Image: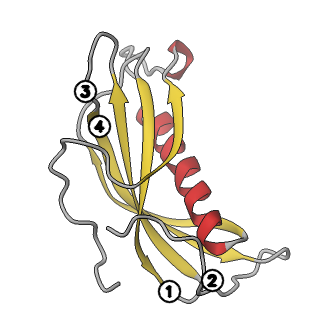
Amino acid sequence: MSETHAPPNDESEPRGDLCTRTLAMPADTNANGDIFGGWLLSQMDIAGGVAASKIAKSRTVTVCIDAMNFRKPVYVGDLVSVHANLVKVGRTSMTIHLEAWVLRRREMKSILVTDGNFTYVAIDEDGKPRAIPSDGAPLTAA
């Protein structure tokens, strides 16, 4: 793939493979009582690591996070789902576009709250970069 960024999302429904789902809890809040952005970023990185390891068929490490868009706040009690789209694959690295969506209490429709591009590198048992197999598990193409 030659694109470096996923196409714009129309914000109507999640795109890509569901990688994680968790509930935002009171312990995850900032001083204002909203869910801390670092917690959400962490959840997205976990989801991206799941997707990257599936593609690489090995351990992976996060090397870059960019194009982050914090669109809407996350509140205690929101059900947070993170979806992954493969943007591109290189010899040892891959870029995955991650979207975090929430389902709020008493709501019927999910809301896109955050998205961004995360780059991962496949590593061997010694922590050295290794080639990504050409038959890596596919994710929904962006």
Which residue is identified by label 1?
90
Please give the label number shown on residue 113: 4
Pointer 4: residues within 10 angstroms few (<14), some, or many (20+)? some
Asked if labels 1 and 2 touch by Cβ distance under 8 angstroms, the answer is yes
Q: Nearest the camera: 2 or 108?
A: 108
Q: Nearest the camera: 52 or 118?
A: 52
Asked if labels 4 and 1 touch by Cβ distance under 8 angstroms, the answer is no
> Would you identify the image quadrant in which residue 84 lies?
bottom left
Of circles 3 and 2, the one toward us is 3
Task: Identify the mark nearer the N-term, 1 or 4.
Answer: 1
Secondary structure at numbered mark 4: strand
Of circles 3 and 1, the one toward us is 3
Residue drawn at point x = 51 percent, y = 13 percent:
26
- Give how far across and how far down residue 103 sits, in percent: 34, 25
Secondary structure at numbered mark 1: loop
Tell how many labels: 4
Q: Amino acid at mark 3?
A: Lys
